[in-house]
Amino acid sequence: MHSALEALLALSNVQRRASALISPMVRRLFELAIVIVLSLLLLTFIMSLWTAEWRIPFYYSSGDAFASQAVFKSIIDNGTYLQNPMLGAPGQLEYYDFPRTDHVQVLIGRILSWFSRDYALLINVFFVLTFPLTAAIAFLVLRSFGISFRAALVCSLLYSFIPYHFVRGQAHFFLNCYFFIPLSIAICLWICRNEPLITRNAKGRLRPTGRSIAATLFCVLIASSGTYYTFFTCFLILISGLYACAQTRRWTSFASASFFLVVLFCVALVNLLPAIRYVQREGKNPVVARRSFAEAEFYALKITGLLLPGNGHRFLPLNRMMRKYPPIMMKENYAAYLGVVGVAGFLILTAWLFFPTTRLNGQELCGSLPVLNGSLLLLGLTGGLGPLFAFVLFNQFRGYNRVSIFLAFFALFAVALVVDRIRQQISGSSFKGAVAVILPFTILAIGLWDQTIPAYVARKPKQLSSFRADAAFIAQIETKLSPGSMIFQLPYHPFPEVEPEHRMKDYDHLRGYLHSTKLRWSYGAMKGRKWDSWQRETAALPLPQLIQTLRSAGFRGLYFDRYGYSGRDQTENELQERLGQPAAVSEDGRLLFFLL
C-alpha cells in the first residue's frame, strides 16, 4: 500500500515537472483536453451510451419533451423555431407570442444540421455535447481564480454531472444548456473585486482592460442563451455592484455593474426584436404565456429541494424515505438537488456568511461567494424576493427554483477552495502528499455515485417502443398522402401550455410532426390568433359540416386520438359511419387516421 502511494506521488511530481516545461497556454489546453475526455468517458459509462439508439431521442415522453423536440426539429427543418409551415395548418405556427432568447442554442442546432437532417440524432448529440462544454467552461473559470488543477477538474465534472442536467434532460432542453453560468459568476466576482473597466496605456490614452472585454463578450453570450439565466445574472451583478460599493464606500464602484447590466439588457432586447415587431404588427396576444404571481410561489425554490435527492437514489434507505415525500410539494424542485458534495459546499457558504471567523485566511473569495450565494437563495426561495417581485412588478418569471444551478456552482466553488487549503496543509511528507493527491478524486467518486442513478441510462425500453410505434403509424399515413397534404387533428387542443384532456397530455399532438417529413398538421397554431380560432370553431361543428369544411379547406386526412375522449366517444362511431374504417391504426390502438 505504501509503495503504491509513493508511486502515485511520484507520478504526480512527474506531471508537475512536465507542466513546468511547457508554456502556460499549452498547459491550459492540455488540462482542458483532460477535462473534455474525462467528461465524455464518464457520460458514456453513466448513460451506457454504447447501448443507445442514437436515432431515437434519449427522452421520448409526453409533455415538455415533445415541445422541446418540436422546437429543435423546427430549427433543423427551417433554420428557425419562430415560423413553422408544417404546424398550425391551414396556416402556420408563429412562435412570436412565446419568444425565446436562446439563440446560441439555435446557432448550435443550425450548425449541427449541416451534417444531418435527423432531429433525433442531432438532439442526442447536442445533449451529449452539453456535458464536456459545461465541464470545460466551469474548469476554465475555476482555474482563472487560482483553483488547483485537481480541485478544478473534480468540481467542474461534478457541476457538469449535477442531477439538474439529467432530470431536465431533453424535456427542458434549453434550460439544460447552462454552460455559460460559470461565466456569469466570473463577471460577478470581478465586480466584487472592483476591477477597473478602463486603464491608461503608456501614452496616457484610455483603453478597455482585457477582463472588461471578456466580461462584455460573456454578457452577449449569456443574454443570448435564455431569459431566466439572463435575469438571474442581472440580479447577481446588481448585488455584486452593491457589495463592491460597501467594500470601497464609493458609489463609483457600481460603474462596472451598471455597464454590464446595460449590455445584458440591450442584447436581450435585440434577441427579442422579432417578437416585439410581430406584436406591434399583429397586436398583443392576451391568452399566451399568462402568468399569475401565485405561480412564482408554486414554482419557487425549497431548501428541501436543494438538500434531498429525488427518487431512485443509490442509497436504499434514503430512496425509501424520499418515496414518502409528496411529489406535489417538490414540483420542479426535483431537479434542484445539489448532491452530497454540493450540499457540503452549500453548508460551508452558509457558515462563511453567518460566521466570518470560519472563513479561510487570506482568501478574499470567502467574503463575496457567500454573499452572492445568500442573495440568490433569498431571491429564489418560497416567500422570497422572487415571488415578491412577481407580485409587485413583473410576473412573467415564475420558475425561481431554477436558481439552483447557480447555487450548485457557488457550492462547488467553495468545496474547491476548501480542498485546496486542505491539500496545502497536508502536503509535507510523502504519505501526506499522496493523501493530498487522492483526496480530490475520492470526492469525485463519492459525488458521482451520489449524483447519478441507473435511471439516467440512454436506452429506455418503454420509450423506444413508443417511438417506434409512433414512427410506424406516421409512416403508414405518409404512404397514403402526397407531400404537403394537410391533416386535421382531433380533439382540438390549443397550443401551447394547456391542461391535459382526459388521458391525452399537453403536446401529445406533436407526435405527428416529430415523425413526419412531408405532411402538414393542424396542431400548433398559436392560441389567441387567427388560425387557432378557425380550428376551434371548425372542430365544434356538427360532424357532417366538419368534414365538408375540412375538405373545402384542402385537408386530406383526419388524425384521431382516443386518449382525448372519455371512453369510446360517439364522434369515433360517426367518423366510421361517414368515412369508413380507419386507413391506419397505431400499434396500441390509440391513434386512428381517416382519409377525407
Image (spheres, grey):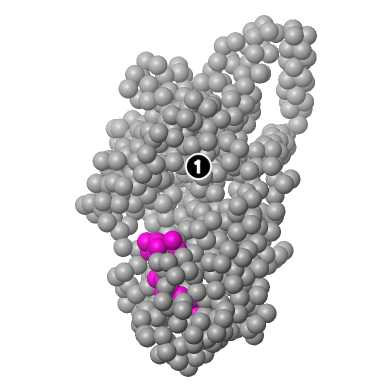
Vertical comparison of 79 with 505: above or below: below
Query: Can residue 442 be seen by looking at this rendering?
Result: yes
Q: Nearer the viewer, residue 190 or 235?
A: 235
Residue 467 left/right relative to 260: right
Residue 85 horizontal/vertical position (percent): 53, 78
- To which quarter of the image does residue 385 belong? top left
Q: Residues within 10 Å of mark 1 (few under 14, many from 20)?
A: many
Residue depicted at x 50% and y 62%? 67
Residue 127 location, x and y as percent?
Answer: 61, 51
Q: Which residue is mark 1?
A: 164
> Does residue 499 show up magenta in the picture?
yes
Q: Residue at left 77%, top 26%?
A: 18
**Which of 408 and 255 lies nearest the eye of the viewer?**
408
- Residue 560 lies, in percent from the top left, at 50, 74
Q: Residue at x 58, y 53 (%)?
A: 59
The residue lying at 52 percent from left, 39 percent from top is: 163
Query: In the rendered image, is residue 145 in sight?
Result: no
Note whether 295 is above or below 411 in the view shown: below
State the quadrant of the N terminus.
top right
**Stretch of the chain drawn in magenta:** 486-504
Element under label 1?
A: helix
- Depth order, front residue of 104/502: 502
Q: Amino acid at mark 1?
A: Tyr
Q: Is residue 341 above or below residue 74?
A: above
The main secondary structure of the magenta stretch is loop
Single out the residue that lies furthest toward the left: 392
| Residue 406 in picture, x, y percent from top left | 45, 40
